[in-house]
Amino acid sequence: MKYSLLLLFGCLITFGARAEKDLALLLTQADHATAQADYPSARALLSQIPESALSQLPAPQQGHYLCLKAEMMARLDRQVAGSLSLFEQGIQLLKDAPAGDLLPNCMLTYGLALGGTGYWSRVIDNAEQVMALTQKSGSNGLQAKALVELGHAYHSLQMDAQALAPLEQAVTLSQAGGDVLTELNATADLIVVKQQLGQPFMELALKNFELAQSKGDLQQRARAASVLATVDFANQRYDEALDALLAVYKDVETSKDDGWQGTMASNLAEVYAAMGDNRKAQFYIDVALDKLAKAKLVKQRMAALLTAADLADKEGDWARRNTLLKSVVAAQATTDSPRQNDLAAKALKQLAQVTTGDEQRRYWDRYAQLMDDRLKQSDAAKQEMERSLSLAKQPTPAPAPAPWRPSSLGLVLAGALLLVLALALALWRCKHKKRLALAQSAGIRRHSELPYSRQTLERLEQLLSQGLHCQVLYFRVGFARQPFYQGGFRAGNAMQQRIAARLRQLFPGALLIGEPDSFHYLVVLDAGRKMATQAAFDVLDESLQALGGNGLQLTCLNFPNFPQISRVADVGPLCELLLLGLQLASETGPNAWVQLSPLPVAARAMEATDIRAALLAELKKGYIIVTAGGSALTSEPDWALLAESL
């Protein structure tokens, strides 16, 4: 009996060890399938491990299982936010494991999921933790991967200057270790960052494409081709973009990767549409929509739906176009990732522009909500990172010096000095008022013969309150040297009269308002006499140069943009909008024009207490669309970034 019990106990121990070994083998096989991007096979292997048997595994292997399960949830089920808690549980269990690659690898995949939910500040923090771990172990390969995530997160926060160094370092480390996959990933982001920073990038894109074709796997070849095609497409090099995509598409087409088949087909459809070949564009977009639906790639399918809607619009099939746009909005609701919000916002904006009444208002409201949410999340993450960076760079404060205490004699002298300054200020104000009255009585403010008074502004208010369909041009004339400073009153007076006469010739019957001393003018044209902004700029620039002008900055505003502006009770908000436009023009160059086109959702800014701050906020969100031109303009400025500096 005794020996029977011992034999039974030994069998149980042997069975337990064998079961643990079988579970560990399944885990290893699932890990290998994941590394090969064969996620369905990985999930099938994990499903053979019952959760009730997990307790038989050591804590590190339990953590490994949870990390793999979370990755399948994020990649296959698209439940990105739902996977985060599983990742966090797995990471906590892996922290008890001996030093190795399991923990940093899980954390890197966790970082991808965080990025998918828009938590970019947490991605940066996670990547820095991985770098600290891998520096101890000396794993350059994992350090390079962490640097790629760090750079990508900074780029996603529009902090490209901070993204540059990590990505360049990732390229260097991956090249030193012969890790082609990581090098290609880092270079793909580096190309975009360099493009945003205005640095040379085309040669890097070509080298990246050649490296991927010679040494990369199919996914890397497809990604490098897409990056190069995107660069060429942005520069309207459509033939080159097509060549880059077709060099890989045949291999992608014969593979089992529905995701890349759909993505590449969508890219081809965009290129063919830009080249005017709508038949081929329609063929590839149909392929893309089918493959991307099978792959459950929500963001890529939303982009393909937008392309399909554009094609339907070109063909005049507006019912299909609206259906496709509504499908984009519906697709956004199927995922918990905010990365699709921009695509949904584009669809809502297009729907609002082709509908009327209450339906239009609902689309604008949903568009504004999406854009506001995106901006709040992005700004919060960006501010948090900038605060962290500033704290990291902040020097240790020196001990504060002892407070200075004035002597009695110092207080007496200071009081006497203040009294003298007060008397001098009073005398200056008295003389200034006399000079101002004398100048006004001499008619200095009226030498242009254009009205500038409050009565004229009230006339403008009356016109706008009637809902007048008009165009407002507000501009400033530049001179090599201001006429009043160069030749005195008579020269300035003569110049103003010549400009006033010329404006009456150019715009007969228009409402003209002048601020003579500063050479600022406002022209209001009625609906039947509107001009293209570039045409108005060219006419004014040529005429003013003939009169001695040396530079022109102009802002144009078309009415009615939306009811709250086309019908105003006070011209103040309009003036703020025009002044902001003129400031943007001056930031653009000495000879430039800017046209402001507010969207309906920007109307609330006109009722704000601080109108200028509200307008800058709407400009930053993209609710006030800005276009620019002129001889001084070499490239379109980043208006949202400029709004921050203003």
Image: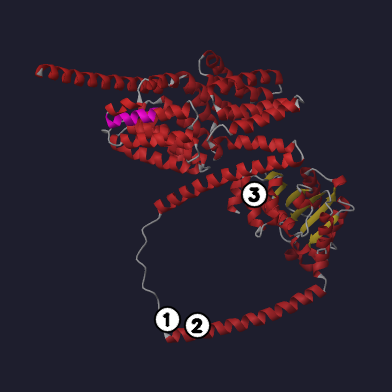
Magenta region's main secondary structure?
helix
Alpha carbon distance from label 2 to label 3: 48 Å
Measured as percent of width and height from the top left, residue 141 is found at: 36, 30
Nearer-N-terminus badge (1/2): 1
Figure check: 305 above or below 197 = above
SS state under label 3: helix
Measured as percent of width and height from the top left, residue 338 is found at: 54, 37
Residue 455 in view here: yes
Q: Is residue 236 left or right of residue 83?
A: right
At x 40% / y 51%, what residue is drawn? Answer: 392
Check residue 406 in the rendering and tell me which mark sits there, or answer none. Answer: 1
Judge by depth and name the residue closer to the eye, 191 or 226: 226
Residue receiving disc 3 = 618
- Furthest residue in direction top, as rendered: 254
Nearer-N-terminus badge (1/3): 1
Check residue 414 in the rendering and tell me which mark sits there, or answer none. Answer: 2
Badge 3 crowding class, 10 Å Cα cut-off, few under 14, some 14 to 19, many 20 or more, is many
Q: Is residue 340 left or right of residue 313?
A: left
Residue 234 in view here: no
Mark 1 and mark 2 in contact? Answer it, CB < 8 Å. Answer: yes
Figure check: 530 above or below 68 = below
Nearer-N-terminus badge (2/3): 2
Which residue range is magenta in the image? Answer: 58-68
Q: On the image, which quarter does residue 635 sit in?
A: top right
Q: Is residue 582 left or right of residue 144?
A: right
SS state under label 2: helix
